[in-house]
Amino acid sequence: MVQVSMKLEMKDTPGQLVRALKPISETGGNIIAVIHQRESSSHSDIIDVQVVIELIEGRIQDLIEKMKQQGVTVQRIGTERLIHRRSLIMIGHIMHTDLTDTVDHIDKTGYAEVSELQLVMPAIAEPSSARITIKASTASAMGKAVDILRDVAKKKEILIIEPLEDAQ
Amino acid sequence: MRIAILGFGSVGQGIASIINTKDLGISIIALADSKSGLINPNGIDIDTALAQKRSGRPVGDSKISGFDIVNKAEYDALVEVTPTNITNGEPATTYIKKALERKKHVVTSNKGPIALHQRELSLYAQENNVELRYEATVCGAIPVIHVLKHGLLGNDITALHGIMNGTCNYILTRMSKEGLTYDQALAEAREMGYAEADPTYDVKGIDTAIKLVILANTIWDWGVSLHDIDVTGIDQVTPDALRLAENDGTTIRLIGEAIPSKKLLRVSPRIIPINHPLVVEGTLNAVTINTDMAGSLTFIGKGAGSLETASAVIGDLLFIRD
């Protein structure tokens, strides 16, 4: 899933907004926000609506086509590609086992990246502790990224503490 | 109901003193500690036996062994509460087999025989038309096996997560609350009597793994052993790691985890939201069971202790009788 923000232009006629949004559910997307600002200075019969949606990545073009058919002009503003986040804790000699290399293993996958790292080093030769946050595009990509981190950590004798996800 | 008790340590004494004070309709007709045995078909004088034990003397006759009691005494149920031997489960496994062979019920708190031979022993009990029950082997006073075998009948168990070792939970709680190092918290746990002189078995996650084996085999009949479990202990956890977790509204606990859809059996320290029902403090135990019909259920209680373990054993005995 990706999160997409879009600026839509459409005619200010009754029912047009509903028609414009309908293709989102038809393509399996979720609407996260609809922002509609009627500008008082505007004298035209065209309105601007901004939507934030969650959608399977390959379906964006399909969605844009369908919206066009409804008479909507679509200006894609941007995509936030990585929307899954998970924080893990690492304990061990994190710096001395090449932290850059550890992070690179995740970053070079293309589907996940390290977005945050908080490191505590109590004393020289003592194991340090870090909280590492990974962002990934899908849940399965996250699973793969965590597997990679687990493998790297094992080789470097770093303990990985994972969050408990399944016990609700 | 006439019972024979093998093992007269903290658990055995707890059971005896409860039977002595509560009118449960159970009489102890034989008793053995590691050095001696005692048989009296009319019922043993428990006050004398307890006093004898407290003064450091053997409880009975050194010529009577545990095997003599198992093979000769006329009991309805054998209560096997000798210390756990996780390498080969002996001599408890032989005691249990002998009793089942004589068509006597068996109730045990001993993790060794159940973790190593649960399937074989349960089949053997079935063939002999008697019961083998072992509630006290997992999570002390929490009747988790009863719930799994009876209370949740008809449900599919889709996941099980538990805090099943009071020593580890005490250490992590103290590290988190007081900022103690692992070594300081372990030393304190020893002082309080919550940790053994050699804490390896607890802190390396082995005790939790053994309990996970027992639960997995009880629920799904997987026939797994200790070697099938991916085990990481808590001995490398730092106070810094706990602080990092807490900045996020989470904490760290040692969790035993079984998920059939992923074929997953794991014991590891985990990050868990501080307000999750599994997050208990001190020596408490907790188990969360996920099911298809009943949803998610969490049980919290004392995981060890003389009376708490006696509660599980006596529950098993009365279940068999009634």
Image (spheres, coloured by chain):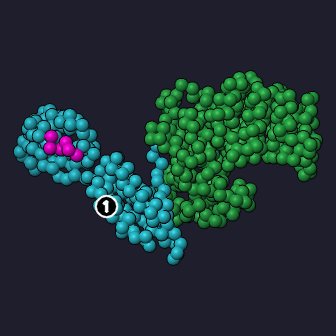
Chain colours: A cyan, B green
Q: Position of residue A129 (x, y in %)?
A: 48, 65
Above or below, A158 against B281 in this view is below
Task: Say what secondary structure mark 1 lies in.
Answer: helix
Left of B6 or right of it: where is A110? left
Q: Main secondary structure of the magenta part?
A: helix
Residue found at x 64% / y 54% = B202
Above or below, B143 against B275 in this view is above
- Chain part drawn in magenta: A57-62
Q: Nearer the viewer, residue A143 or A16?
A: A143
Left of B192 or right of it: where is A157? left
Specify the farthest residue to the left. A44
Q: Position of residue B62 (x, y in %)?
A: 92, 45
Residue B110: quadrant of the picture: top right
Residue found at x 35% / y 47% = A139
Q: Which residue is mark 1?
A: A107
Residue found at x 56% / y 62% = B236
Callout 1: chain: A
Q: Position of residue B169 (x, y in %)?
A: 62, 53
Q: Nearer the viewer, residue B195 or A55?
A: B195
One can see residue B197 in this view = yes
Left of B108 or right of it: where is B33? right
Q: Position of residue B106 (x, y in %)?
A: 74, 32
Residue B64: quadrant of the picture: top right
Q: Quadrant of the N terminus of chain A?
A: top left
Residue found at x 48% / y 56% = A161
Residue A164 within the segment the image draws in magenta: no
